Image: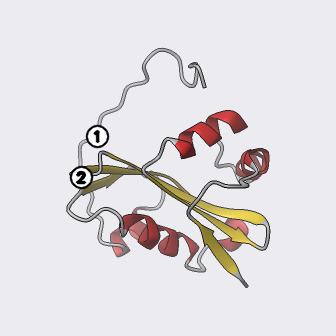
Amino acid sequence: MNITYKRDLLDVDWEEMKATLIKDNFHNGRTAKQLKTSFANSFSTCIAYAEQQIVGTARVLSDGVCNAYIVDVWTYSEYRHQGIARKMMEIITEELPGQHVYLFTDDSVDFYKKLGFTEQPTGLSKVIGKWLVNDY
């Protein structure tokens, strides 16, 4: 299997990404345009491809100095347990020396522990206004 990892967002088929996320039950309601904006506004991105098919994503939000947050880590179900997510995590975290890196997951704790992350018991969140209702 030939997996390639793209760092740039040139030629990303955002409609395909949305359709694949929906098919794989990893869709959070973003439109293709919102996906594009989310990735474009990120500090760092990685998209994994098997041939021309999107099979994985990962991205980082960061201030570039001391705080980073990893989001949208996903591997298409048919391609899981083959090292794709691990490789994407290695790629995006290389650019974060000296930073406190945080992520949220509700189903992959053991995977992230293997990558050196530790659980932190308190996390808070708040949606401002209505979820995904914005100018994007």
- At label 2, counting other C-alpha atoms closer than 10 Å, the crowd grade (few under 14, some 14-19, many 20 or more) is few
Q: Look at mark 1 in the image and give the residue it sits on.
A: 123
Decide which of 7, 49 is in the foreground and name it.
7
Left/right of residue 59 with respect to residue 96 in the rendered view: right
- Tag 2: residue type? Gln
Q: Amino acid at mark 1?
A: Gly
Q: Residue at x 68, y 72 (%)?
A: 79
At x 67%, y 55%, the residue is 10
Q: Position of residue 18 (x, y in %)?
A: 73, 45
Q: Residues within 10 Å of mark 1 (few under 14, many from 20)?
A: few
Badges 2 and 1: C-beta atoms under 8 Å apart?
yes
Which quarter of the figure is the C terminus placed in? top right
Q: Residue at x 45, y 70 (%)?
A: 91
Please name the residue that numbered disc 2 is placed on: 120
State which quadrant residue 133 falls in.
top right
Q: Is residue 9 left or right of residue 121?
A: right
